[in-house]
Image (cartoon, rainbow, N blue to C red):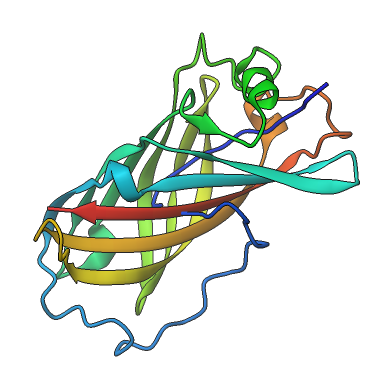
Amino acid sequence: MHKAIPLSALALLCATALPAAKPAKPVSAAAIDTRGVSGGSYVVDQNHTQVGWRINHMGFNDYFGLFGQVTGTLSLDKADPSKSKVSVTIPVSQLATSSEGLNKHMLSADFLNASQFAEAKFESTHVMVMGQTAMIHGNLTLLGVTKPVTLDARLSGAGSNMMTKKETLGFHATTKIKRSEWGMTKYVPAVGDEVTLQISVAFEK
């Protein structure tokens, strides 16, 4: 029988082979040129944004997957970045793993219960900016339960997209949650309670 995970939110990442999450390292202010960045409202680039998850399976190994088709907004206050706001919505049905059977099990009432709770959502409440890194505090709503989480985020790119010509900001973020706190208790502790979330997001205007 396949088991599974939860998921989450914001800012923002991941690839098919997810490395262990690491805190964002301080980035030199000169690392990414932000002089041309303008404040205001940005929207998520759905085609280039992913939320990845990783969880332990019965103490043997980790398995992982992705959520796509993420939507959301970034309100950037360039004068005072700590006043910026992020809101991201994840359609849980847009789940991808290497197993069709696992996908179906994860979307069932055992885990994500997608038929009743179609979306997960992250909304920031406070941003602490340190150069080109930030701690994004906010609330994650999953399975109808809302609890605080903190994203460890860093700016990963800024500038004009050569294809679309749109002003674009990229971020990577990580966090860990305990799925049982959102009511997802099936198979805990055989299938891990702790879930690593890795987010790669592009915002454009």
* Residue 71 rendering spot, x and y as whole percentages: 30, 37
User: Observer-nearest residue: 62 or 183?
Assistant: 62
Foreground pick, 79 / 20: 20
Q: Quadrant of residue 59?
A: top right
Position of 95 with respect to 119 (left or right) is right
Measured along the vertical axis of the image, is residue 169 above or below residue 126? below
**Count of numbered labels shown in the rendering:** 0
Residue drawn 47% across and 59% down? 173
Residue 153 at x, y percent in the picture: 44, 63
Depicted 72 relative to depicted 109: above or below: below
Q: Residue at x 59, y 15 (%)?
A: 113
**Based on the displayed image, in which of its 4 quarters is residue 82 positioned?**
bottom left
Would residue 152 be found to the left or right of residue 167 on screen? right
Q: Residue at x 33, y 50 (%)?
A: 48
Q: Residue furthest top?
A: 116
Query: In which quadrant of the rendered image does the N terminus lie?
Result: top right
Residue at the (22%, 83%) spot, across then down: 33
Q: Position of residue 42 (x, y in %)?
A: 17, 50
Left or right relative to 133: residue 147? right
**Above or below — where is 170 with respect to 117?**
below
Residue 65, percent from left and from top? 60, 41
Depth order, front residue of 154/144: 154
